[in-house]
Amino acid sequence: MAWKTLDDMELSGKRVLTRVDINVPVENGVVTDATRINRIAPTVQDIIQRGGLPILLAHFGRPKGHRVPELSLQALVPSLEAAFNVPVMFAAECAGPAAEAASAAMQAGQVLLLENTRFEPGEEQNDADLAKGMAKLGDIYCNDAFSAAHRAHASTEALARELPACAGRLMQAELSALETALGQPDRPVVAVVGGAKVSTKLDLLGNLVAKVDHLVIGGGMANTFLAAQGLDVGKSLCEHDMAETAQQILVKAEAAGCQVVLPSDVVVARAFKAGAANETVAADACPPDAMILDAGSATVTRIETVFRGAKTLIWNGPLGAFEIEPFDRATNAAAATAAALSRDGALTSVAGGGDTVAALNKANAAADFTYISTAGGAFLEWMEGKDLPGVAALG
Ligand code: ADP
Ligand code: MG
């Protein structure tokens, strides 16, 4: 590995500035899913056990360089204390005199949480002065936020160049799992790309066709491809202005010998709600007043055949509007097949993305996947073979 881990660092008596991702969902002041907090606990506890003082840097929401009281990290203190089982102090800034005083006052066995890094305009600008201000608070930099590593921000990139730097336990686990599964993947490799964010993922698709043997396109994204081929997709989620890009991706896939699987049949409905009346029609027979909300069973059968012939599966994006039944059927069925093949040792399966993980959990398939990444954007960029600035800066 090109980067250091906590094992390579002398931590005793050292203040360890640790970048974490605790951007958890909160409703009415209550954390509704503490997964991200629980996943960084091993790093925090490891630092404490080895005599270090963990100082946490994190972003929360999108305050865009302004102090937005509702996005203060102070609200997360009780959840952090519950997860780490140690007292968590709070400083109302992530750099500056108050943060320095809080850092200096830390006692062994405590954690210090700094205020939302994105309250500072310099954070998203990867500002060197902000990074220098942060660096004054610690002796060592530890990055445990793989899911934020695709962004070159002051707390993920510039700061790594100010202090001796290493990867935290979660970052280490993500990187080694992805590297093991996909560094030199067993072929054939199939990628499933679905979901809603059509324009952001078209870029991903363009890069993937050169790397994988089969590309399954599903979800709202598939509609853009069907429309680009001249099919009427009615009222479906579709980006018609991306038609040309979609065509180019298909041409590139053909040239690269990548077999693209698009829906041949689709589930359509007139309303985007649970239990809406629906029917399965051929992909070229979507009624003008209907929406495509899922892949049909013939398409699922084809996807499953591709899975059975593959050795490695990379999955981002559900095949349909999985949150509303019955439009979760294609995702559930394909996920169950991938899970069974993985359980049998026939397939190495890796998935990532916020909604993808939710969909695989809902399908009871996640536990059988070889690896589930907590990251969305970073996972996608890693899949594309891009260098992640936050990881590169550790090298
Ligand atoms: P991830 O978070 O895993 O990267 P996305 O956010 O890109 O995934 O996509 C998930 C969303 O895509 C879900 O909310 C799902 O309802 C939506 N989606 C999938 N297929 C369709 C479709 N045919 N029409 C509308 N929305 C869809
Ligand atoms: Mg999403």
Image (cartoon, rainbow, N blue to C red):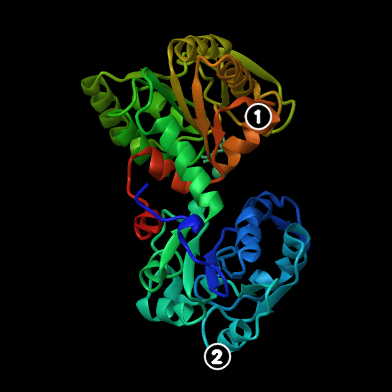
Residue neighbourhood size for the residue with mark 2, other residues' Cα within 10 Å, grouped as few (<14), some (14–19), many (≥20)? few
Instruction: Judge: label 1 CB < 8 Å from ligand 1.
Output: no
* Disc 1 to disc 2: CB gap under 8 Å: no
Q: Quadrant of residue 3?
A: bottom left
Q: Position of residue 283 (x, y in %)?
A: 47, 16
- Which residue is rendered at x = 78% and y = 66% of the image? 78
Q: How much space separates mark 1 and mark 2, taking CA atoms?
A: 46 Å
Task: Classify residue 29 by image quadrant.
Answer: bottom right
Q: Looking at numbered disc 1 in the image, what kind of residue is underneath it?
A: Ala
Residue depicted at x 51% and y 38%? 196
- Give the position of the C terminus as an image quadrant: bottom left
| Horizontal side, residue 379 vs residue 110: left or right | left
SS for dot 2:
helix
Q: Residue 202 in the image: state x and y as whole percent.
A: 37, 38
Q: Is residue 232 above or below residue 237?
A: above
Instruction: Classify the position of ligand 2 by quadrant: top left, top right, bottom left or bottom right.
Output: top right
Mark earlier in primary sequence (1, 2)? 2
Can residue 194 be seen here? The reply is: no
Give the image location of residue 345, x and y in percent: 54, 16
Residue 367: mark = 1
Residue 364 at x, y = what percent?
69, 26
Q: Nearer the viewer, residue 160 or 358?
A: 160
Q: Using the image, tell me which numbered label, if any, was put on residue 266.
A: none
Q: Residue at x 57, y 70 (%)?
A: 12
Residue at mark 2 = 97
